[in-house]
């Protein structure tokens, strides 16, 4: 009977050891997951900021193109008038 008790004790100790190791691994994985989620959020914010800058720059470039075209028409008209 003593052998059975010792075997049971070893089994329980093995289960406790496995549980402790798995719990540590689980905590580590959760921490990694949380860091990954934070990184994704940070990258999403940066992406949104860059998209906003891009839209703003596109608007500015479009306005400049319109102004350059207008200026070219004015210069073209001036050249024809001088001729």
Image (tube, rainbow, N blue to C red):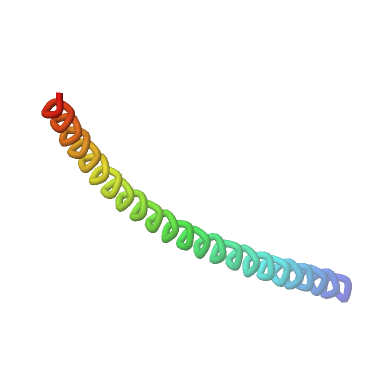
Q: Position of residue 8 (x, y in %)?
A: 79, 71
| Direction from residue 52 to residue 2 in the image, left or right | right
At a point 35% along the width and 49% down the height, the residue shown is 54
- Left or right: residue 11 versus residue 48 is right
Q: What is the total number of numbered labels drawn onto the structure image?
A: 0
**Residue found farthest to the front:** 82
Q: Quadrant of the N terminus?
A: bottom right
| Furthest residue toward right | 3
Measured as percent of width and height from the top left, residue 24 is found at: 69, 70
Q: Nearer the viewer, residue 76 or 48?
A: 76
Q: Give the image quarter of residue 65.
A: top left
Depicted 55 relative to depicted 9: above or below:
above
Q: Residue at x 85, y 73 (%)?
A: 6
46 and 76: which is toward the camera: 76
**Of 36 and 17, the residue lying toward us:** 36
Q: Position of residue 37 (x, y in %)?
A: 50, 62
The C terminus: image quadrant: top left
Furthest residue toward left: 81
Image position of 83 with respect to 46: above or below: above
Residue in the picture at 36% in, 54% down: 53
Q: Quadrant of residue 29?
A: bottom right
34 relative to 46 in the view: left or right: right
| Residue drawn at 54 percent across, 66 percent down | 34
């Amino acid at each position: 009977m003593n052998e059975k008790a010792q075997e049971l004790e070893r089994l329980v100790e093995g289960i406790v050891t496995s549980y402790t190791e798995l719990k540590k691994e689980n905590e580590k994985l959760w921490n990694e997951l949380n860091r990954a989620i934070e990184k994704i959020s940070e990258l999403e914010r940066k992406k949104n900021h860059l998209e906003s800058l891009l839209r703003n720059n596109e608007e500015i470039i479009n306005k400049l193109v319109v102004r350059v075209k207008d200026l070219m028409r004015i210069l073209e008209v001036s050249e024809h008038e001088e001729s």
